[in-house]
Image (cartoon, rainbow, N blue to C red):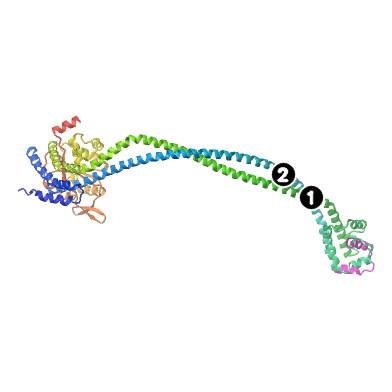
Amino acid sequence: IDWFQPWPEKALLGVSQRFLGDTHLGKAEVAKAVMEYMPFSFGLVGQMSQKFLQQERRYNYTTPKTFLELIKLYKSLLNKKREVTQTNIDRISNGLDKLMKTQKDVDILVEQAKVKAVEVEEKVSSAGAFAEKVNSEKASAAIENDAAQVEAEKCAVIAKAVGEKQVSVQAELDSAEPLVEAALAALDTLNKKDLGEAKSLKKPPSGVDDVTAVIIILLMNNPKDKSWGAATKMMGNVDKFIDLLKGFKEQIDLGNVPKKNVDACRPYLELEHFNRETIYNKSRAAAGMCEFAINIIKYFDVITMIDPLRQELAEANEQLAEANTKLAAVQAKVAMLNALVADLERQYDEAEAEKNGAIDEKAKLDVKLSLANRLVNALAASGEQWKNTVTQLNTDISLLVGDCLFAASFVTYAGPFTAKFRTALNAEFQKNLTDTKIPMTKGIDVLRVMVDPATIAGWVGEGLPSDRTSTENGTITCNSERWPLMCDPQLQGIAWIKERESKNSLQVVRMGAPKTVDQMEKAIENGYSVLIENMAESIDAVLMPVVTRSTYKKGRSLYVKMGDKDVEYHPKFKLFLHTKMSNPHFPPEVQAETTLINFTVTQDGLEDQLLA
């Protein structure tokens, strides 16, 4: 009993209208013709399958699933080809726009180059003028620097002399310091009690009156009365007297002590008994005054001796100050000139940098202009060719409705047939497309629509025979919406698949082998390719969900059922089915879920391979 009854053409047309209604097919009459073509091609293939069975004794079934796969492939192929063609149109049009823009930019660059040439000339002239001014100011600054160096050397000589005098005077002052300390220390031995006892004497011991006479000369400006009475009167106020003695050094430093007074004291200092040890035995107070007198007069002599040195030092300091003032003025002038030179050099550097920048910019502009001219000249011929290419692509995109329909029909239906029947089938497809005025490339070739020469060359390099039929089989294998089922008794197709998919970790299994299911699960999860070789005319039930691509979504991932196990479905997974049987009879349910491809080598095919 034949359980498979043909679908009514009206039902097929309704399905076409339902699935193609949202696809842009051009004019209404073209869309109508495309939708009517679908049931026509389905019926035509059914008739061709009958002839195929009668003449070649081979079975081929067209099922509703096959019909739906044709519509699905056609929509997918049409969208893909439109996208690729539009991308090419946009890319070449963009190139044309860039070419036109480049031509305009070249014109602008020419004008910019002229302006830049004038600018460079001006900057070179300006930099030259700056250089002359900088050199002139540098010369002036050098002269002033030399003058400042001379003044600095003079100041150095004066400063050296002043320093030496300062050291000499300081040494003398340092030598006088112990005398002052001894005199002041002698005063520390004086106290009210000793002075009170001394001044209460009616007649002092011998030599004490000489000591008081020296003190009277120093403190009282050498009066005529140097008697003991005058001395007791001088010591009347003990505190005041001691303060006078302590302040005498300051009077010497101020120059208020006449030299004649000190000279009047010298005869007394020459007396044999005029020393501390001798006088101490006679009067403690007198001994302290004696020691004070001796040391303070020595201090006076030292101060008197270094006073000319001090005057010379003061004069030298004045000379040094005057020289430093002059040097500071010269240095200020030099600093001003140096600052001016530095500023001019900065301006010159800026002008030089601007000049060099302008020269570099002009050089870059010239290079850019040269390259742009070369580019425009080189692409001038290509521009016209690009325009023609855009025109041709716009024409091609309008013909994709028919071209893709023809190619999709071939990929979906032509696989099981031999070369002779494929040629006849293609002729009928083309005739219908022409009669219904569906836009299509004249002399259309399915290989030109589906693949390019580089792809075909790649297949041949991978082991696919180079004859027309084998190339068509490769095109169907790589573009069908269902997994390919290869009828390949000569093993040419399987050799090609093994080489082609080796880079995708191809797993070769056999139906019913112990580890087939485990290998399939691993391949599906990892995105490997699987080749089921040497299969019979049926497919194991456990593998049917994979063959039919019965995937379902769980979370964000796709899964497929294998027995009682959910296997995550990798998007890169591929499946190839293969049989070595020369004339297998696959039931409709198998052919509905796969794309049967006839790789059998005929005598004509062998001739093509040998000639190729």
Magenta-colored stretch includes residue 263: no
Q: Amino acid at mark 1?
A: Glu
Q: Which residues are magenta?
A: 192-220
Horizontally, is 84 left or right of 421 in the view? right
In this view, the residue in front, 380 or 480, is: 380
Horizontally, is 557 left or right of 38 in the view? right
Q: Which x, y percent locates residue 232? A: 91, 67
Q: Amino acid at mark 2?
A: Glu
- Residue 83 makes an appearance in the image: yes
The reply to whether the C-beta atoms of the residues labelled 2 and 1 are less than 8 Å apart is no
Please name the residue shown 75% across and 49% down the image: 322
Please name the residue shown 15% across and 35% down the image: 601
Badge 2: residue crowd in 10 Å (few <14, some 14–19, many ≥20)? some
Tell me the element at label 2. Answer: helix
- 227 is higher (above) or lower (below) than 389: below
Q: CA distance from mark 2 to mark 1?
A: 19 Å
Q: Which residue is mark 2?
A: 151
Q: Which residue is mark 1?
A: 315
Q: Which x, y percent locates residue 584? A: 11, 41
Q: Which x, y percent locates residue 605? A: 15, 33
| Most common secondary structure along the magenta stretch | helix
Label disc, if present, on residue 17 of the rendered structure? none
* The C terminus: image quadrant: top left
Magenta-colored stretch includes residue 216: yes
- Quarter of the figure with residue 508: top left
> How many marks do you count on the picture?
2
Horizontally, is 171 left or right of 609 in the view? right
Q: Which x, y percent locates residue 129? A: 58, 39
Q: Residue furthest top?
A: 611
In this view, the residue in front, 575 or 536, is: 575
Badge 1: residue crowd in 10 Å (few <14, some 14–19, many ≥20)? few
Horizontally, is 23 left or right of 191 in the view? left
